[in-house]
Image: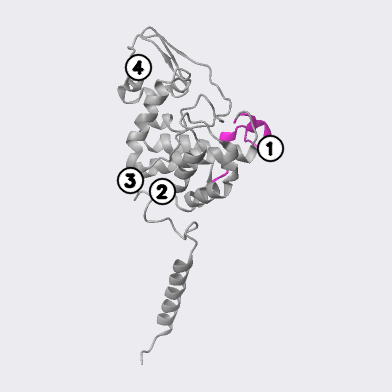
Amino acid sequence: MKHYTIKGMVMLLFGLIVSGLTAFRDPFFPLSPLAEPVSHVIFDQLAKKYIDEKGLVNYKGFRSDGKELKKYLDLLAGNPPTDKWSQSEQIAYWINAYNANTIQLILDHYPVKSIQDIGSKIKIPFVNTPWDVKFIKVGNETYDLNRIEHGTLRKKFDDKRIHFALVCAARSCPRLRNEAYTAAKLDAQLNDQGVDFMNNPAKNAITPQKASLSKYFDWYKGDWKDDNKSVAYWVNRYSKTKINENTPISYLDYNWSLNEQ
């Protein structure tokens, strides 16, 4: 018969408890982040159902499928990215988190004519815009949309194409894709976003003589000029109509109307 010391019995009991918790945990609320990156299938399916090819959103449809959207947001909340994930896996996670939570923010205040209208409804001290509302769970922390965009994506990842992917529920924003971003397709997806955004005359009106660009190029002027590049470089990378460094540039008014079907 095998004999155990008190220490051995304690260690055995602890092992059994941990093993049992691991076996029966809720897959959407794991005790620790998954070793593998999360799947974005749920959001992909929702996007295909409720976002059209122009990037316009059927918010009433999303609201009817609110449990599925919440399931996806809970999955993201319980599995924050780690440095063991590839850069593409991390970027895809954060872009999807931003876009899916923006949809949830609209649904929380629906119906609204503009995301900016939510600002007047907020009754939280020191919170003046919808982008400052801390409602996004990521691991043990609570984020706002600004922290995802400025404190995480722009700060940590050197990829200006992120600006073509984040969508703040306005018609002048880039197109909201009717699919989720994934690591395997991220590079192609971001390039496609750039082509679509730069060649949409409602968002960028470009001729060889002058360029009337999205306010994005004004708001984030420092980003576009990083790495000794210029606004003209980024325009020419994706626009079918080319400009040069001396082409006069102005900025279009931003349409904040809700991107609703």
Residue beneath disc 3: 86
Q: In whole angstroms, how far apart are the C-alphas of marks 1 and 3?
A: 39 Å
Residue 161: give x, y in percent of width and height.
Answer: 38, 30
Which residue is pictured at 34% across the width and 39% down the height?
A: 185
Label 1's element? Answer: loop
Residue beneath disc 1: 123
Residue 88: give x, y in percent of width and height.
Answer: 34, 41
**Label 3 neighbourhood size at 10 Å, few (<14), some (14-19), many (20+)?**
few
In reply to whether residue 195 is colored magenta, the answer given is no
Residue beneath disc 2: 81
Q: In whole angstroms, how far apart are the C-alphas of marks 4 and 1?
A: 42 Å
Q: Which mark is residue 232?
A: 4
Residue 32 in which image quadrant = bottom left
Q: In whole angstroms, how far apart are the C-alphas of marks 2 and 3?
A: 9 Å
Which quadrant, please, contains the C terminus? top right
Amino acid at the residue labelled 3: Ser
Q: Are marks 2 and 1 in contact (CB under 8 Å)?
A: no
Q: Magenta segment range?
A: 115-136
Could you tell whether 143 is left or right of 3 in the image?
right
Q: In whole angstroms, how far apart are the C-alphas of marks 2 and 1?
A: 31 Å
Residue 164: give x, y in percent of width and height.
Answer: 42, 29
